[in-house]
C-alpha cells in the first residue's frame, strides 16, 4: 500500500455510500492504519448526489479537507457519470471503480481515462438485489474496492462488515451483505 491512499466516493443519498466509506475506514483502522472517513452533502434528500471521502495512511493524518486529487474514485451510482465530472482532480494513475452493467472498456472511453489510469466495473446493484433484495450497492462496492486496491484482505473486510452491520441488522441482512461483499470482490472486472 502507498503511504497515503485517498479515496473519493460518488453516490446518491440512500445508497449506503457514506456507510461504505465508514466501514472501509473501520476495517483499515482495525488493521493498524490511520484513517479518515467523512461525507460531503447538504440538506438534500434521498436520491441527491453526495460525496464521501477516505484517507488511509501508515502515518498520522493531520489534514482535514475534501479529497481533491484521489488515488481511487468509487462511483456507487453510474447515472452520475452523465451529470458530474467524476474524474475531476484525478491523477495520471487514479483507479476508478464503477457500479454499472457496462463493459469496463466502454466506461474507460466515456471517462476519457488515460493510459495509466485503471477502470474497473461491477454490477453492484444486481449483486445487492440478488443477495438481500434491495438496490443498496454499498457492500458489493466495498468488495470490489478491496480487491482492486489491496488495502485490506477480503477476510478482514468481511469481519468488519459483520461487526458494523451486526449492531443494527438481523442475521439475514448481515449474511446478505457478507455475500454481496464477497461477490463484489469476485465479480469486479478491469478494462
Image: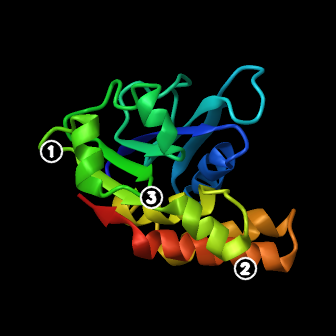
| Quadrant including the N terminus | bottom left
How many residues crowd around disc 2 within 10 Å: few (fewer than 14), some, or many (20 or more)?
A: some
Percent of width and height locating residue 8: 47, 37
In this rendering, is residue 122 above or below 118? below
> Is the Cβ of the residue at disc 3 closer than 8 Å to that at disc 2?
no
Earlier residue among tags 3 and 2: 3
> Is the Cβ of the residue at disc 2 closer than 8 Å to that at disc 1?
no
| Quadrant including the C terminus | bottom left
Q: Nearer the viewer, residue 63 or 157?
A: 157
Q: Secondary structure at mark 2?
A: helix
Query: Which of the 4 image quadrants contains residue 86?
Result: top left
Distance in Å between CA atoms under marks 3 and 2:
19 Å
Percent of width and height locating residue 174: 76, 74
Query: Which of the 4 image quadrants contains residue 149?
Result: bottom left
Q: Which residue is mark 3?
A: 145
Q: Which residue is mark 2?
A: 175
The residue at 21%/35% (across/down) is 112
Q: Secondary structure at mark 1?
A: loop
Percent of width and height locating residue 105: 22, 53
In this rendering, is residue 72 above or below 169? above
The residue at 53%/22% (across/down) is 65
Q: Secondary structure at mark 3?
A: helix
Distance in Å between CA atoms under marks 2 and 1:
37 Å
Side of 45 where 87 appears, left or right: left
Distance in Å between CA atoms under marks 1 and 3:
18 Å
Q: Which residue is mark 1?
A: 116
Amino acid at each position: 500500500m502507498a503511504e497515503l491512499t485517498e479515496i473519493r466516493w460518488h453516490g446518491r443519498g440512500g445508497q449506503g455510500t457514506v456507510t461504505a466509506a465508514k466501514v472501509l475506514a473501520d476495517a483499515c483502522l482495525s488493521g493498524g492504519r490511520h484513517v479518515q472517513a467523512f461525507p460531503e452533502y447538504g440538506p438534500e434528500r434521498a436520491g441527491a448526489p453526495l460525496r464521501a471521502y477516505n484517507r488511509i495512511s501508515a502515518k498520522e493524518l493531520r489534514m482535514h479537507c475534501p479529497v481533491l486529487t484521489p488515488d481511487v474514485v468509487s462511483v456507487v451510482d453510474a447515472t452520475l457519470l452523465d451529470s458530474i465530472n467524476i474524474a475531476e482532480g484525478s491523477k495520471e494513475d487514479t483507479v476508478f471503480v464503477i457500479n454499472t452493467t457496462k463493459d469496463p472498456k466502454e466506461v474507460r472511453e466515456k471517462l476519457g481515462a488515460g493510459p495509466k489510469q485503471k477502470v474497473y466495473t461491477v454490477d453492484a446493484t444486481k449483486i445487492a438485489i440478488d443477495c438481500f433484495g434491495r438496490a443498496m450497492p454499498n457492500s458489493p462496492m466495498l468488495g470490489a474496492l478491496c480487491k482492486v486496491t489491496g488495502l485490506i484482505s477480503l477476510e478482514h473486510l468481511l469481519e468488519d462488515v459483520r461487526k458494523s452491520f451486526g449492531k443494527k441488522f438481523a442475521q439475514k441482512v448481515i449474511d446478505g451483505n457478507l455475500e454481496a461483499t464477497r461477490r463484489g470482490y469476485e465479480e469486479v472486472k478491469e478494462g
